[in-house]
Amino acid sequence: MAAGPRAIDSRACAQEWPISAARLVRRVQSTPPMVPMTLLALAEGAVAEICALTGDAGVTRRMQDLGLFAGRTVRLVRAAPFSGPLLVEEQRTGARVMIARAIAVHIQVLDAGAPGR
């Protein structure tokens, strides 16, 4: 005889939902905060969202000319050895640009693979 759909234990659901305000606050407080890091801190292949461009007007303008704006998602394709440049791919357009490490230090990102993203 085929088994029918399993009955839902309403007591188990009542324990989890509705969630109390105090329990929700504890969950939010236990979630690690999203800490921005520079593009240099990403591992090869990692995807991140640009959250800020720092530096003087010339550096910021150069990054924007390369298509790097706050809110864009990028992937670090390759980091050249011996303090060489970084190959970064903008995810929406697929455009790839080489960035000197001196410029990459001015790009603040949030890791897209981090919890809560």
Image (cartoon, helix red, strand yellow):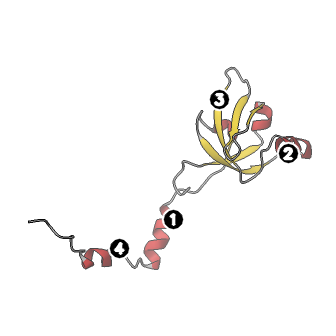
Q: Which amino acid does label 1 sit on?
A: Gln
Q: Is residue 100 above or below residue 116?
A: above
- Which residue is the extreme one toward the front? 1
Q: Which amino acid does label 2 sit on?
A: Thr
Q: Is residue 66 left or right of residue 95?
A: right
Choose top left, top right, bottom left or bottom right for residue 40. top right
CA distance separating discs 4 and 3: 44 Å
Q: Which amino acid does label 4 sit on?
A: Glu
Q: Residue 112's x, y, as percent? A: 58, 49
Which mark, by number, is residue 16? Answer: 4
Query: Which residue occupies 21% across, 74% down?
Result: 7
CA distance separating discs 1 and 3: 35 Å
Categorize mark 1 by other alpha carbons within 10 Å: few (<14), some (14-19), many (20+): few
Query: Which circle's residue, 4 or 3, is located before the other in the chain?
Result: 4
Query: Which residue occupies 74% across, 27% down?
Result: 85
Residue on which disc 3 sits: 78
CA distance separating discs 3 and 2: 22 Å
Provide the secondary structure element on which disc 4 rests. Answer: helix
Q: What residue type is labelled 3?
A: Arg
Q: Do the residues labelled 3 and 2 touch (CB within 8 Å)?
A: no
Q: Residue 4's x, y, as percent? A: 17, 70
Q: Residue 104's x, y, as percent? A: 75, 37
CA distance separating discs 1 and 4: 18 Å
Query: Which residue occupies 46% across, 66% down?
Result: 27
Circle nearer the viewer, 3 or 2 = 3
Circle nearer the viewer, 1 or 3 = 3
Choose top left, top right, bottom left or bottom right for residue 101. top right
Residue on which disc 1 sits: 29
Q: In this view, does 64 lie to the left or right of 114?
A: right
Categorize mark 3 by other alpha carbons within 10 Å: few (<14), some (14-19), many (20+): some
Query: Which circle's residue, 4 or 2, is located before the other in the chain?
Result: 4
